[in-house]
Amino acid sequence: MNPFPGAPMRLQDFDFPLPEALIAQTPLPDRDGSRLMVVHRATGTVACRTFPDVAEYFGPGDLLVLNESKVIPARLAARKESGGAVEILLLRKISDSVDSCEWEVLLRPGKRVREGTRLYFTGRPRAEVISRVSPKCWVLRFDTGEPFERFLEREGQAPLPPYIRRTGKEGLRGLDLERYQTVYARVAGSVAAPTAGLHFTERTLGEIGRRGAETARITLHVGLGTFQPVETEMVEEHRMEPESFEMTEETLERLREARRVTAVGTTSTRVIETVFRNPGGPLSLRGSTDLYIYPGFPFRRVDRLLTNFHLPRSSLFLLVCAFAGRELMLRAYGRAVEEGFRFYSYGDAMLIL
C-alpha cells in the first residue's frame, strides 16, 4: 500500500545521463575543498559556490543535524579452500562470544557459496558460512583467535562502494580509512559512510557556530537499507531494509525549538522524519527505521537538506526529489553535469534551501 497517495511513478522517470568521468574516485586534498551547489526551492534558482561558503547560510535559530555514526573497516578479502577469492561486506553483528562472533554479510561472488563453506584470511583466522538469510545475504561465523575488533583493524578495508575502483591501488588503503569517515564520527557501526558529512572540517563547523547556529547529533548506522538498489519498476513497490538509529532527548528538544532544521545527509533526514512521524503520540528515540522517502512524502521537521550528488534511480535520489521536486532536481543535476561537478561519495555537495 502506498503510504503517500499520488499518481504511480516509474523508476525510469528518475534516471539521468551521467558521464563516468564525473564519478569521483579519490577525495580532494582538502576535506572542504569541494564545490557546493545551492538550490533555492522557492525560486528554482541554482548557484555554484565552494563548500566553506556553506556557513553563510546559517544564523541564530538554525540547527545543523549531523549523523555521528562511525564507519567500520567492513570489507574483507578471503579465500575458499579451493583458493577462490571471496569479498565479504559486513552488514550486521548477530552474536558475539569469547571465541567467535556471527555477522550477516554480503558475499561476492556468492553463487557457488554453500552452507558449511569455510573462508580463510591471513594467518589463523577463518569464517564458516552458517546459513543464507536472503538471495543476497549470508550469516558467517568468525573464528579469529583474538578480539574481533583487533582482527578487523588489521584485515578490514574501508567499505567503499563498487563505483570507486581500488584494484591495483592498495596504497590508497590508509587514505580511504581516514577520509571515508567524518571528522565528528563517534559511534562505530556503519558499513558505508554518511557521505554528506565528509566535507566538514572543524573550521567550517566552528564558523557555523560563530554565526549563531547550533549543532545536534543523531546516529543512524548505515547498512543495506541506504545503499540497496531500487530494482522495482514502480517506485512505490521498493522496500527499505531496517537500519538502527538513536536520538537523545536533548537533540529532540533542540529539534522542537529550532527555527530551521538543516539535515546533513539522507540518513539524518530519515532519522528526524522517523521520530516526527507521530507528532501527536509517543516518540521513539531509538530502534530501527525502514522509512522510505519518495515523492509525495510529507516532511514534518526537516527544513533544509545538505547532501551529495547521488546515483540515478536510487532511493537517495528519490529522497532529494521528494524534498525539492523531481523537475528541479533533474535540472540541478543537469547543470552539475554540464559544469563538471564531482559525483557520489567522494564528490561535491548540494545545499537545498
Image (cartoon, rainbow, N blue to C red):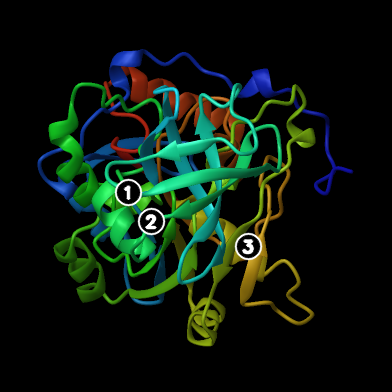
Q: Earlier in the sequence, mark 1 or mark 2?
A: 1
Q: Which mark is residue 273?
A: 3
Q: Residue at x 35, y 20 (%)?
A: 337
93 w.r.t. 329: above or below: below
- Farthest-out residue, right: 1
Q: Which mark is residue 124?
A: 1
Q: Residue at x 62, y 39 (%)?
A: 137
Q: Residues within 10 Å of mark 3 (few under 14, many from 20)?
A: some
The amino acid on which the numbered mark 2 sits, given as a three-letter code, is Thr
Q: Which mark is residue 112?
A: none
The amino acid on which the numbered mark 1 sits, given as a three-letter code, is Arg
Q: Residue at x 21, y 32 (%)?
A: 26
Residue 235 x %, y %: 73, 31
Seen from the viewer's position, the closer of residues 242 and 216 is 242
Q: Earlier in the sequence, mark 3 or mark 1?
A: 1
295 w.r.t. 99: above or below: above
Q: Is residue 192 visible?
A: no
Specify whether 43 is left or right of 210: right
Q: Residues within 10 Å of mark 1 (few under 14, many from 20)?
A: few
The amino acid on which the numbered mark 3 sits, given as a three-letter code, is Glu
Q: Are marks 1 and 2 in contact (CB under 8 Å)?
A: yes
Q: Which residue is mark 2?
A: 144
